[in-house]
Image (tube, helix red, strand yellow):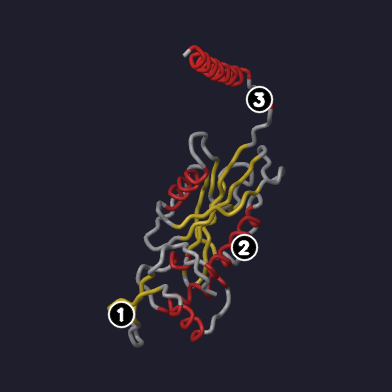
């Protein structure tokens, strides 16, 4: 019994010393020992309007780059994680939530922001613009949809970020179902092909595209057809898969 008690005492003593050491480390750690760069999120928010891929831009209200167009975004708050910050910024600019949102890449050139050392984590979101009301936030003077392939000279390194986002979006269309996020819930096969052509910025063979889509079991027929059209009504379809699911489409 005496030996067992001694072992327990030793174990307790060891844990106590470990706890003490940890408490001492917490009290003596110097948080100012290392530089603390700021972190932002920048959003590439895409939609389709007038048969073109558009990206949301904001016009900056203050220095730096006052009056220049930029991707929407902002600084990450101390009490939120990166995705929470991205979702917050998305809702502030577009009023929408629960859309497809994905982290892209981290941009950390030391000179990318003249204010201070700022590391930006870029995201992209795909939304249907119908019913979306754009609202300039307090630090911008205007917000608008701009054709994504007609690049303006943007603030900071946002041209680089947007270029990367466009390339990533093209890749994602080839092996996931993200394209369906840009369609209404019920769509025609022509509308589906058009989304691919708009994002990829090239024409696709109609016969081969439909053959591929039908072979993947991605969509299901509805009993509904297009209405109020000059040509023969087309059948409407719905997506059977989860948005973002990996499927080799192209």
Q: Disc 1 vs disc 3: Cβ atoms closer than 8 Å? A: no
Q: Which disc number belongs to residue 151?
A: 2
Of labels 2 and 1, earlier in sequence is 2
Query: What residue is rendered at 63% in x and 59% in y?
Result: 164
**Residue 188 image position (x, y, % from top left):** 39, 77
120 over 189 or under it: above or below? above
Is residue 117 among the parts visible in the rendering? Answer: yes
Q: CA distance from mark 3 to mark 2?
A: 41 Å
Rendered image quadrant of residue 24: top right
Check disc 3 and report the residue beneath it: 32
Is residue 57 among the parts visible in the rendering? Answer: no
Which of the two marks, 1 or 3, is nearer to us in this view? 3
Q: Badge 2 local density, few (<14 within 10 Å), some, or many (20+)?
A: few
Which of the two marks, 2 or 1, is nearer to us in this view? 1
Q: Nearer the viewer, residue 89 or 215?
A: 215
Disc 1 on helix, strand or loop?
A: strand
**Residue 182 image position (x, y, % from top left):** 44, 66
Query: What residue is rendered at 49% in x and 80% in y?
Result: 212
107 over 231 or under it: above or below? above
Query: What residue is rendered at 63% in x and 25% in y?
Result: 31
Query: What residue is rendered at 64% in x and 33% in y?
Result: 36
Dividing the image into 4 quarters, which one contains the C terminus?
Answer: bottom right
Check disc 1 and report the residue beneath it: 225
Of labels 1 and 3, earlier in sequence is 3
Of labels 3 and 2, earlier in sequence is 3
Disc 3 on helix, strand or loop?
A: helix
């Amino acid at each position: 019994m005496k030996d067992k008690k001694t072992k327990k005492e030793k174990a307790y003593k060891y844990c106590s010393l470990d706890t003490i050491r940890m408490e001492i480390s917490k009290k003596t750690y110097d948080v100012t020992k290392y530089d603390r760069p700021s972190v932002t999120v920048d959003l590439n928010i895409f939609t389709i309007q007038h048969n073109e891929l558009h990206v949301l831009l904001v016009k900056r209200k203050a220095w730096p780059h006052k009056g220049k167009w930029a991707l929407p975004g902002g600084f990450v708050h101390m009490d939120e994680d990166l995705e929470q910050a991205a979702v917050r910024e998305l809702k502030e600019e577009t009023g929408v939530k629960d859309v497809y949102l994905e982290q892209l890449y981290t941009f950390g050139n030391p000179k990318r922001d003249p204010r201070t050392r700022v590391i930006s984590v870029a995201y992209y979101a795909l939304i249907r613009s119908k019913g979306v009301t754009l609202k300039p936030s307090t630090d911008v003077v205007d917000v608008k949809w701009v054709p994504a392939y007609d690049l303006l000279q943007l603030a900071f390194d946002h041209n680089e970020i947007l270029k990367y986002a466009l390339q990533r979006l093209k890749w994602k269309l080839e092996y996931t179902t993200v394209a369906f996020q840009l369609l209404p819930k019920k769509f025609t096969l022509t509308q589906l092909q058009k989304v691919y052509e708009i994002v990829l910025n090239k024409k696709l063979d109609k016969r081969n595209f439909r053959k591929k889509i039908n072979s993947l079991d991605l969509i299901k027929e509805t009993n509904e057809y297009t209405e109020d059209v000059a040509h023969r009504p087309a059948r409407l379809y719905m997506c059977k898969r989860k948005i973002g699911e990996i499927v080799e489409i192209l």
